[in-house]
Amino acid sequence: MAGAGKPSGKLAKNVVKYGVRYGPLIVEAVRHGREPAQQAVQAAWAKRSARRKAVEHALTVRDGSLLKVIKDGQAIFFVFSGDAIVTTYPPVPQATYPELLRHADLDKREPAVVLAARKPRPHLPKVRRKG
């Protein structure tokens, strides 16, 4: 029976030894790995909420339509009422509108009614269960 306690004592000793040696490295790796993941999730959430707000706003104006423009890897949604720009989501200064729309095809604007009627895409695949 004396030998039964020995392996668990050795295991505990190894856990402590390796925990002290590699613990700080593991903590830093988790911390550095978590930050980019959190930033990516926040960016995706901001993009999705900006589009949703833009569609909601475009539905409230006469002849509302939406135009998506990419600037520096970020999607900017222009809300139009007829041919007039109402606002952008996320907000950008009005002075930058001509620069952002310089090479944009305004014929690619999508009516807000069409965008609101689209069926939302599923975010996760369906899980098939065996049995």
Image: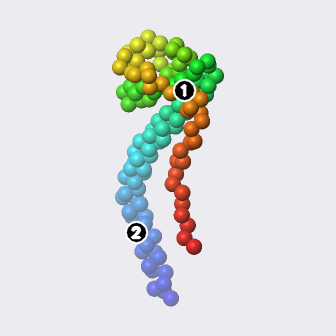
Residue farthest right in this picture: 60
- Is 97 placed left or right of 124 in the picture? left
Residue 109: image x %, image y %?
Answer: 48, 24
Q: Nearer the viewer, mark 1 or mark 2?
A: 1
Residue 119 seen in the current view: yes
Q: Residue at x 41, y 60 (%)?
A: 19
* Residue carrying label 2: 14
Residue 6: image x %, image y %?
Answer: 45, 80
Residue 111: image x %, image y %?
Answer: 54, 26
Q: Is residue 109 above or below residue 16?
A: above
Inspect the image, locate mark 2, and give the three-letter code of the amino acid beneath it.
Asn
Q: Earlier in the sequence, mark 1 or mark 2?
A: 2
Q: Residue at x 53, y 44 (%)?
A: 121
Q: Residue at x 53, y 19 (%)?
A: 80
- Is 43 placed left or right of 53 in the picture? left
Q: Secondary structure at mark 2?
A: helix
- Which of 15 and 97 lies nearest the eye of the viewer? 97
* Residue carrying label 1: 111
Q: Residue at x 40, y 54 (%)?
A: 26
Inspect the image, locate mark 1, and give the three-letter code of the amino acid beneath it.
Pro
Q: Secondary structure at mark 1?
A: strand
- Which of 24 and 43 lies nearest the eye of the viewer? 43
Q: Is residue 43 above or below residue 86?
A: below
Residue 126: image x %, image y %?
Answer: 54, 57
How far is disc 1 from disc 2 in space, using C-alphas? 65 Å
Instruction: Name the disc covering residue 71, or none.
Output: none
Q: Quadrant of residue 104?
A: top left
Residue farthest top in this picture: 95
